Image (tube, helix red, strand yellow):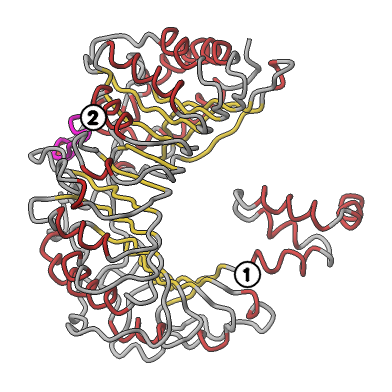
Amino acid sequence: MTTHASTLQRLPDDILWMLAEDLLCIPGTLCSLASTTRRLRPLYAPILFSRCSSTSTGALGIPPVYIRPFVKYIAFYGDYEEGHSMFGQELRYLPHLQEIQFCRCPKGVPSGVLQKCLALARISSVSFADDATFMQVPPYPDTYTPCLHPVLKLAYNVPTWRDADQTDGPDPHANLPLEAACLASITLSMSSSAESLHLPMATAPLVRMTQVDWPSLKELSLHGTISPSTASASALITLLRRTPKLHALTIRANRSSDLGPTAILGRLPPRANLPKISLTSLTISFPDPDDAIFDTDTASLVHLALCDMPRTYHTVNGDGLWGHSTRYASGRGIPSATGVLRILRRMDLPRVRTLELVYVADGPEDDELLFYIAGNLPSLSLLELHRYRLDRESCVDYRHICGLLAALSTVRSLRLNLDFEDDDGPYCCLMLFKKWYLKFPGIRSEIIQSLRTCPRLQHVAFLHWFDLEAVWAGYTLSRGDSSMSRFSVTADTKDQYPKDFETRPAGRRTRCMRTIWLASYRGPFT
């Protein structure tokens, strides 16, 4: 240990910072390393103490003097006592605090608690985790007043499966009016300063937001579920006209099974009616090929995602499907390859570097789509494909698909979810899982070898499921010896499992699945 510590003492700071970045993904590791030498403690303190947590009751007391200058983010856990007089006593001791998050308070965040936070001039970001709600709080003031100090970011998260998880507990729809009223009070108060808004589609005050200007808004994200009562396309068009600086629009909203594709800006209205926006990032779940959003100015787009929400593999595969999954449009609402091709042909995409597509293969148009991607996106660097079979009894001709993808001349990173016929998805039994992961390494190696002809390709990843999460597992390729390819695992950040997954057989056997899966990835490609 002494020898290793002396070696660390001699390393330059930039190397130690790079080491810290790699260790952050392993909980507790960086803290242990910082405890080994006196030199590392002050070097890593700004990282270790930049994010802290506390309780809603102030039970942890005043923060130690040493860590106070480093804290930039704090999360408050737990419900709030009546009067909440003890809340936030640590706030005035943190001179560089910028972000506040509320977590694990199912009874809700009272208006007084939020106002105490916003009274601090340095707070620029407020977020609510998906387990922090307005379930049992008095309604926020109906008439909003501008924030005393500029708040730049607001994020109110709701569970991906909120509308489906109704097997126990209260009906989540019962509190939507209260949630909408509280969100309106918060959101409208920051209209002059807001730069980023992340709001649920069902309760975002879109209509009231059209009545004020949003001169600084750069990012607008709407998530949750689209229903017949959701604000109309005309409201969103009006809102976009009031956001002159908007560059990122994300609408990752699910549709109930009885609601077809919904055009965000309506279906092909006259171009004169469209808002004049120039986005650099556009994410649309279950896109309508006739949506007018694709006729706006897209020449500056760098990121484009035509995706699903929640992931389609939760409903199309496996022996563990349960009733509430079928209430979602997943697997039925995603566009065909023909529809995606129509969308891409309508858009001007000279600068797109990252592209995510989720679609159902529907015959020859599937080939035409891949041809179009390879030949018409000159700046494309990362391509993520989720290709689902229209005929659930058909086989995936992965050799043919790889032959088409081999024409990609600019792509450096490729992510593939090809919906193999032998892969029963995240809810299959252990026997089927073992069978597939004994077969897949051979297919994986064949795909990698076929794609080595892509001149700039550096990384190929495949989608897998275990431990209550979906991951991209793949290799950073070596252009020399194939045995030098480096294995990596990255979480699919756009996925979330239903809350009752752990109690089901599919959830209880995922530890065993992970052991088998990691074993299947040992050894080089051949």
Is 466 in front, or is 49? 49
Identify which amino acid the numbered label 1 is placed on. Answer: Phe
Question: Residue beneath label 1, please?
Answer: 49
Q: Which amino acid type is marked by label 2?
A: Pro
- On whether residue 118 falls in the magenta region, the answer is no
Q: Is residue 320 left or right of residue 384?
A: left
User: Which quarter of the figure has residue 95?
Assistant: bottom right
Q: Residue at x 35, y 84 (%)?
A: 147
Q: Residue furthest front?
A: 272
Left or right: 477 with respect to 331?
Answer: right
Q: Position of residue 94 (x, y in %)?
A: 57, 83
Which label's residue is closer to the chain start, 1 or 2? Answer: 1
Numbered circle sitting on residue 208: none
395 or 136: nearer the viewer = 395
Give the dominant element type of the magenta stretch: helix, strand or loop.
loop
> Residue 288 lies in what quarter of the image?
top left
Q: Residue shown at 70%/68% (left/top)? A: 45
Please state if 300 lies on the left or on the right of 503 as rendered: right
Q: Is residue 120 above or below residue 504?
A: below
The nearer-to-camera label among 1 and 2 is: 2
Q: Position of residue 509 (x, y in %)?
A: 39, 32
- What segment carries the magenta color? 324-333
Label 2: element kind: loop
Residue 89, above or below 463: below
- Residue 404 higher or lower than 200, as above or below: above
Quarter of the C terminus within the rendering: top right
Which residue position holds label 2? 335
Q: Position of residue 467 (x, y in %)?
A: 44, 38
Q: Residue at x 50, y 25 (%)?
A: 517
Residues under labels 1 and 2: Cα distance?
45 Å
